[in-house]
Amino acid sequence: MNSLQPVILSGGSGTRLWPLSRRAYPKQFLALIDDTSLLQSTAARLDSLGDAASVQAPLIVCNEAHRFLVAEQLRASGHAAGNIILEPVGRNTAPALTLAALDVVDDDPVMIVMPADHVVKDVAAFARAVSAGLKHAAAGKVVTFGIVPDSPQTGFGYIRAGAATDAQTFALEAFVEKPDRQTAESYVSSGDYFWNSGIFLLRASRWLELIGRFRPDVAAAVRDAYQAGQRDLDFYRVDQAGFAASPADSIDYAVMEPLSREAGECLVVPLDAGWSDIGAWAALWEVSEHDASGNAVHGDVLAFDAQNNLLHAQHRVLAAVGVQDLIVVETPDAVLVAHKDHAQDVKRVTQYLDEQGRCESEFHRRVHRPWGSFEGVDMGERFQVKRLTVTPGASLSLQMHHHRAEHWIVVSGTARVTCDDKEFLLSENQSTYIPIGTSHRLENPGAIPLEIIEVQSGSYLGEDDIVRFEDVYNRSGRKG
């Protein structure tokens, strides 16, 4: 039985799904379809492949800033969390896959390469397609999966298939850029074109050979960065300067497009499995369940004489009256209203927020940390109030602030507090004061989450006013 190494690429920022998706918490970590995140669903999809191959624990390549989110979500879904490679900067998918291939090439498995943020509803059909392509990839071919189109979409790249190589596999003749509407209609009516899924099967050694041939500059820079890396907790941290020296390029542009011009090297397996890349809000509406009026509803929503809307409420009641084809998304700190025809233009909002130096494109009101999370409650001149949630057994770093003092009030749970050379416990309704310049640490020694109200006061309240002395998460000198 072939050894199959799943490689999940989790580097996307998902700005088209703002305000649910933010750069610090992008769409792969969101539960958009059911109770599991897209990353967790991607990992769970691999469980269906056990009859076709010996499936290894997934290898994740992710943004360094998301490392603890990835590990936490994998553990929560019952998957191993010790196989994570960190990208210190984003360089697109070709360098990311090169890191993965270098990590596993000694055993030279067939890799199944998948984005972390796609939806595949028919997992059995997905498993059959992988099984059909596996023998070809094991023999040295590069296999991709073409999504059977159900409409003439202009937002996807296409694959043109050639002659059949067997009952389930076709020669890949060309990758085609996103077409206009008329061209897309001709593609779909011909039956020779598929949407480009971005999912691949190939051996690790084959990828390293190809990236070395077509993009030797990428191959050399990434190899140097990988070899200069080191293990850090659950993660493998590659050399930052070395990886930053690699040009940015995608798998398609770097390798697949030039390789597709060499007859017989690339194959495509049709995949008809309820796939979506959820590239924009309109795509989420399409794959969601609808009520009798065509509305996709989430949260506390009231709809009257409203048709074909996506209505998503997180924090408050959302009422829609006499509207159609709208996207309305409510979060604690932002509300989006857009027509479905303009769903792709949401990125203009995040671009504007970035230009204005605002934080709403980066963070939610609740910000996740490896020890738990904090949420802004109120702020004004020289003060802000936060709600901290510390998971059982977790602790913040031993740290100090130059510009702010802190008051901690325990709402629930038990806190162990270090304040200079003192250590003591606080229980519900008890409080303490941390003066400016005092080294301090907050821990949760209990079995339930610790809830703290933190009142900060001082001349500067930014998150970068933290001097870390000790940290169980090795964050000294690093953000996050």
Image (cartoon, rainbow, N blue to C red):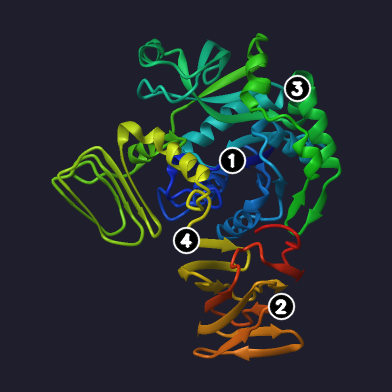
What residue would you read off at disc 1? Answer: 51
Quick check: can you spot residue 1? no
Q: Quadrant of the C terminus?
A: bottom right
Of mark 2 and mark 3, the one earlier in the sequence is 3
Return the residue nearer the eye: 132 or 90.
90
Q: x and y percent of residue 76 in the render?
A: 56, 61
What amino acid is at disc 4?
A: Arg
Picture quadrant where residue 222 is located: top right
- The one nearer the camera, 146 or 296, is 296
Q: Is residue 416 left or right of residue 175?
A: right
Indicate which disc, 1 or 2, sits on the residue closer to the N terminus: 1
Residue on which the image places disc 4: 365
Q: Using the numbered discs, state the Cα–Cα distance from disc 2 to disc 3 in whole angstroms.
A: 51 Å
Element carrying mark 1: loop
Across and down, in percent, residue 414 comes to: 57, 85
Q: Amino acid at mark 2?
A: Gly
Residue 437, disc: 2
Rendered location of residue 324, percent (x, y) = 21, 39
**Which residue is label 3 attached to?**
215
Q: Position of residue 330 (x, y in %)?
A: 34, 54
Residue at x 76% of width, y 63% of height: 476
